[in-house]
Image (spheres, coloured by chain):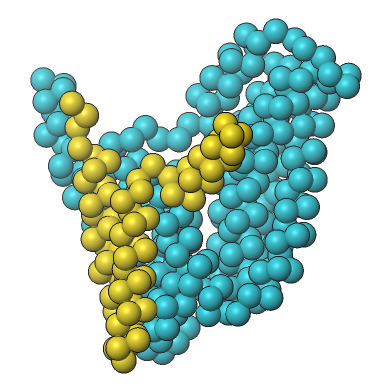
Chain colours: A cyan, B yellow
Amino acid sequence: MSAGFLVLSSFLASAVEFVEALTIVLAAAVARGWRSSLVGAGAAAVVLAAIVAALGPTLTLVPIDALRLVVGALLLVFGLQWLRKAILRASGLKALHDEDAIFREELEEASRVQSERRAGLDWYGFTLSFKGVLLEGLEVAFIVLTFGSTQGSIPIAAAGAGGALVLVVAVGAAVRAPLARVPENTMKFAVGVMLTTFGIFWSAEGAGAHWPGSDAALPVVLAFVIALSFAFVALLRRAAAPRVAEVEA
Amino acid sequence: MSRLVAFGRFWWDFVIGDDWLAAAGVAVAIGATAALKAEGVDAWWLLPPAVALVLYVSLRRAARPKT
């Protein structure tokens, strides 16, 4: 797999998670104060950095076939989760991810809770921001570590994630609003396709199989997953249409 | 104990998600690939159709109207 492909996969997956984390941090900041929210986000970033620093070098010690088997299986399970949701969204059976709506819900909930101060911070704002960044960041850490370690280049995968972080934070700081115009649903679809593709490729290799043409088989698997996903979207749209018509009648 | 349960539940939700059957299907398919390899069959071709089947079943379950 080329470095460019690794960076792109890592960038897209991370950007989606950072956009979601930004929405939560913004909602906490607007409702509970910027200081508590930013300190919460910063504390989560420190915890995430510690997790990556501890797990990164450990993963490089695991034999590559065992690593590919475990990582491939995890990526495949993870990728199928993303892909299933993306296909359901694209076929109209699940509501599209809407950062504006999520921001309004988070804001409303954060505004209702009474203020409790600990260590000079609004505790609710701190924990909301901390949990949001930690949970979304864990997915980024998982993707960077698995993609990077299996290809023997965690720094390249981390560069993709770092680029996404800089871009999302810069745009978020400039607009101070949820990044609702980011084509998040399309990006999630792409990430689901990529995770599933790499999951199929690496778990088969980890189980001892050898792909014809070695790495050259990867684009073929990618094309297969894309074709499969679009076929399922078309199938579900057709199946959903009578149901929608029934409701409208 | 409840913290341990919550910790386990977090990782279950994080990795397995809301369809355990899809995760089980993936595990069976990878296991079958390894078993075939042990018998001398290079079963690189097994996972793509297995994933198609798992995804089909998972989507059918998710798209089924709730009664």
Residue displayed at 73% across by 53% down: A51
Give left or right: position of A88 versus A149. Answer: left
Percent coordinates x, y for residue B13 in the rendering: 48, 42
Q: Position of residue A6 (x, y in %)?
A: 59, 69
Identify whether A141 is placed above or below A222: above
Looking at the image, is A177 positioned above or below residue B33?
A: above
Q: Quadrant of the N terminus of chain A?
A: bottom right
Please say whether residue B51 is visible from this viewpoint: yes
Quarter-of-image position of residue A199: bottom left
Give the residue displayed 51% in from the left and 40% down from the top. Answer: B9
Residue closest to the eye, B16 or A187: B16
| Quadrant in the picture for residue A193 | bottom left
Residue A15 visible in the snapshot? no
Query: Which quarter of the image is occupied by the C terminus of chain A?
Result: top left
For image coordinates 84% across by 18% down, the residue present is A118
x and y, in percent, of residue A11 in the image: 61, 57
* Left or right of residue A117, residue A13 in this image: left
Q: Nearer the viewer, residue B47 or A178?
A: B47
* Residue located at (64% from left, 34% from top): A132
